[in-house]
Image (spheres, helix red, strand yellow):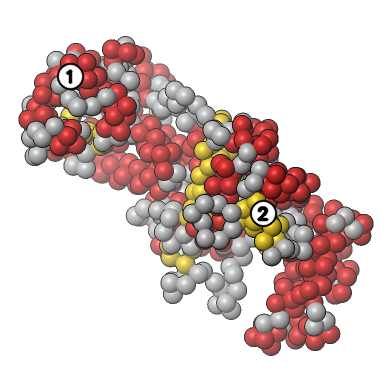
Amino acid sequence: MSASVHGSYAQPGRTDFREAFRLAMAGVLQQAIVAGDLPIDAGDVPGLLEQVRETTDSKFGDYTTTVAMPLAKRQREKPRTLAERLISRLNADPDFTALFEPVAEPVGPGFINVRVRDDALAHGVAAACGDVRLGVRPVAQPETIVLDYSSPNVAKPMHVGHIRSTVIGDALARMLRFRGHTVITDNHLGDWGTQFGMILWGWKHCRDEAAYAADPTAELGRLYRLVRKVADAKPEELAADPIAAELAAAHPEAGREVLLETAKLHEGDEENRRLWEEFMPVCRREIERIYARLDVAFDHTLGESFFQPLLAGVVDDLVAGGLARESRGAIGVFLEGRETPLLIRKADGAFLYATTDLATIAWRAEHWQPDRILYVVDHRQSQHFQQVFATARAWGGRAAEQLASIQLVHVAFGTVLGEDGKPFKTRAGDTVGLEALLDEGVTRALAIVGEGEHTRQGMDESQRQAVAEAVGIGAIKYADLSQNRTTDYVFSFDKMLELKGNTAAYMQYAVARVEGIAGRGGIDREALRQQVAADPASIELVDPRERRLALAALRLAAVLEDVEADYRPNLLTAWLFELAGCFSSFYDALPVLKAEGRQRTTRLALCDLTGRALRQGLELLGIRVPLQM
């Protein structure tokens, strides 16, 4: 971790200055361990280095650490006194002073604040300009990570509740891949449950064959919605739907009959299996069409039906290993410290979601050998995953070896709320359909795109529509991703489509402004990048706004590290907002195209780097960036 182990960390053109400061601190702490100056060992160092962060105010420098405070407490020394000793060692390290200005003294009770040297920052800008990855190095130890997200029930129309899992999972997949990990995405479709029993029952009792021939997707969706009302038999729903009410009166046992149709499918009934195989491609095509609009794709789509043949073996294995036993005719896993068992087979012999999840974990462990499996599923499933993960870790027998070293993570998220503070619904009280949501976003975005800008830039109608699609859907995605994923958030089209504030439209507009600078100035951006990369001395950061923008543009690597640490995409959106704000302050105050000499080169390079960084950040969120708005 230290410079003495890995060589100089003051490479020319370094862009990840927070990591360089960490390495410097690691070297200092290692010296203290060898000299016996501090009551720590090598195992303490990584945790201490996590306290190296960016400062919140540039007047305190660029990076800070509180490492002296916990160490001083251990040996009953004043934090400021210990910080002074650590600073002395930092200032004596030529690698440190090649990147950072010498530190005068601690701040306050013991903060160690450092400032990046202007020439080191200029070299960092030059290096990032000449790098397709903007100076972001792949992780030193890449892992294989399986991401399980979206996972709709295929016989139901996708609704607003699917947006969070889908966009959070897709963004994490993009970021983890960019970091250098091997990422395997799997859409674990619900393609084998009661929802298919509803469609099968509906097909046999109330299908419209002409409607099915004209639009299979619409007819299957109608059957599902109708039969759900009949099976649930809620008086208020039946009162509002005469057709459902008539069916419910004619078939008072419809709910039980739906379950029987589901059981027949699972048992291999020839007719139900044939219908399932006919309906599945229809349902899949509809889902894939929605994913295409969202720019979401999966490496694998292994639904519940894929794992059905494995479920009996999972139950047998857990019973044989002593983890599961019979209770009231059902079979459950009884874990120490848990009040309720994890049921894996019902008394009637049917398997449960937990059985499928355990089979899926074991299959992924055997076939993909992942280091981590991430489940992007809403917070209401927390207890379920706690029990499933605990069972998987305790599982003996044939699964033990594969499961022993895998990190299982539930990436939980909150609920999408309407402005009334309740789960987002239509005015009629129905769940909002996902495609209707996307359509509304695009329609509203079209009004923004059409406000005069296209006339000046010569945008035709098809271009306006394409830009509106990018802006509208990008707004919906960004509004979700900019929230702390664990909290609920209020959905508001008016706020998410604003051209100011922390919105996708604001970020997209900032990129368009950068594109406009290059276009108006006739700048060959690739030639500019090559020039700057070959001659770092052409970068001269004089104005504080130039320096602030440069530091912000070079923080992508650190931000992605922080996102991965807790799977929070909102840390990336916060950085994008900060970067766009830095650029706005810079651009509004300083001439770019009218500047001369190194000043012009510096500002053009900063504009180009900022535009690329904003574009890269948005692409990592799965948001398209139009060239003009």
Question: Is 444 situated above or below 257?
Answer: above
Question: Is 37 situated above or below 70?
Answer: above
Relative placement, left or right, of 237 versus 596 is: right
**x, y percent for residue 610:** 36, 35
Relative placement, left or right, of 595 versus 250 is: left
How busy is the neighbourhood of tag 2: few (under 14 within 10 Å), some, or many (20 plus)? Answer: many
What's the distance in space between the residues labelled 1 and 2, CA to CA?
Answer: 55 Å
**x, y percent for residue 360:** 67, 44
Amino acid type, residue under disc 1 in the picture: Gly
Relative placement, left or right, of 271 versus 409 is: right
**x, y percent for residue 403:** 59, 36
Residue at the (67%, 82%) spot, across then down: 234
Residue at the (19%, 13%) spot, across then down: 94
**x, y percent for residue 236:** 64, 85
Question: What mark, if any, has residue 258 been given in the picture?
Answer: none
Identify residue for label 2.
Answer: 325
Residue 230 is at least partly visible in this image: yes
Q: Say how many tags the image has.
A: 2
Residue at the (57%, 42%) spot, across then down: 394
In the structure shown, which secondary structural element does the residue marked by tag 2 occupy? Answer: strand
Residue farthest right in this picture: 270
Residue at the (75%, 45%) spot, across then down: 313
Identify residue for label 1.
Answer: 36
